Image (spheres, grey):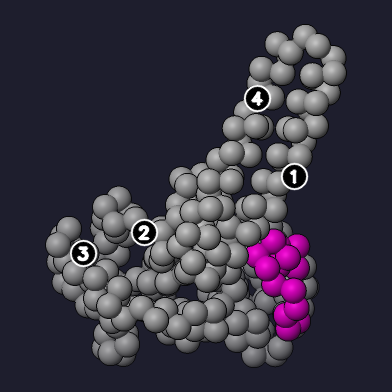
Amino acid sequence: MENSLKSIVETIKQRRSIVDTEKSLHEVVDPFAQRTKLGQIKRAKEDLKDLYLEYRTELKQRAAFVILTGSKKEEFSALAEKDFGCFFLDADTFYLSILEKVPARLYTNFTASPTLFDHIGARFGDMAQDIEIIGHAAFLFESKYKKVLKDKNDALELMKRAFNDKIGGEVVGLDAIHRVAARAVNEDFSEKTVPIILQTDDELLVKELARDLKRLTPNVFVVSIGTKVGKDIKNISTASIKTVTEESVKQSLLKIKENLR
């Protein structure tokens, strides 16, 4: 598997080098040579689209999710990314990317309604294909979601609970893979495992993601950092540390590596 990803990266580099020649196309005087070069550049651009999808598929097969929570999570994430090749995102990124496209009037001092859910469902439909979701359950309003929403935070909380209940939290993982792939491909990343950190203070979200991401991969781990972590979260944590240092981050990630399947 590792060699296949390296092969894709090398092919991507080669196609990029062809696309880069577009900058000097004006220097080609001969009309026939210029048309030939244009054809090569066009094919290279088309190849890069296919290669990116192939690259993302490979990354998906290698993904290992680390769900991070606790008072020192930002410090852990920063060290894990800087020194240990991890990628990290806020676990709310997926939900917020949808909510930001929904009219604020539908969740500002307003009661949650079918109209709000229709908007969320439509925006999710717009992005579903991009993150490799072909079919999914409808995001339908139910009476249990009829709550007064004061602001964006209230809407986000409701959306997370309803989304994970009706669609499934694994979409957070698919969205994360899509975002990480866009960055990793530019860094020529070709490691055997893709460690993706999803950080959050929402302990219910931790439990939902720990359950639902396993539909994508068995490699899903919870790490609790510092204080303010509930006992039930500590009970499902692969690693739990109080002080964030380079050594403690290293040992936590090594423990996760030992448990990879």
Q: Is mark 3 in CB contact (under 8 Å) with mark 1? A: no
On screen, residue 240 above or below 78? below
Q: How far across and down, in percent of the image, does residue 157 sit? A: 53, 74
Q: Earlier in the sequence, mark 3 or mark 2?
A: 2
Indicate which disc residue 250 carries.
3
Q: Give neighbour class at mark 1: few <14, some 14-19, many 20+ (Cα, 10 Å).
A: few
Indicate which disc residue 86 carries.
2
Q: Say which residue label 4 marks.
A: 21
Q: Say which residue label 1 marks.
A: 46
- Residue type highlighted by circle 2: Cys
Instruction: State yes or no: residue 44 in magenta.
Output: no
Looking at the picture, tell me which residue is in the foreground, 109 or 202. Answer: 202
Which of the 4 quarters of the picture holds residue 66? Answer: bottom left
Q: How far across and down, in percent of the image, does residue 92 sit? A: 50, 66
Q: How far across and down, in percent of the image, does residue 148 sit? A: 61, 77
Indicate which disc residue 114 carries.
none
- Residue type highlighted by circle 3: Lys
Looking at the picture, tell me which residue is in the foreground, 44 or 175. Answer: 44
Q: Disc 3 to disc 4, how far (Cα)?
A: 42 Å
Q: Is mark 4 in CB contact (under 8 Å) with mark 1? A: no
Q: Residue at x 59, y 45 (%)?
A: 12
Magenta residues, as a range? Answer: 125-138
Q: Of discs 3 and 1, which sits in the foreground?
A: 1
Q: Give neighbour class at mark 4: few <14, some 14-19, many 20+ (Cα, 10 Å).
A: some
Q: Can residue 96 be seen in this view?
A: no
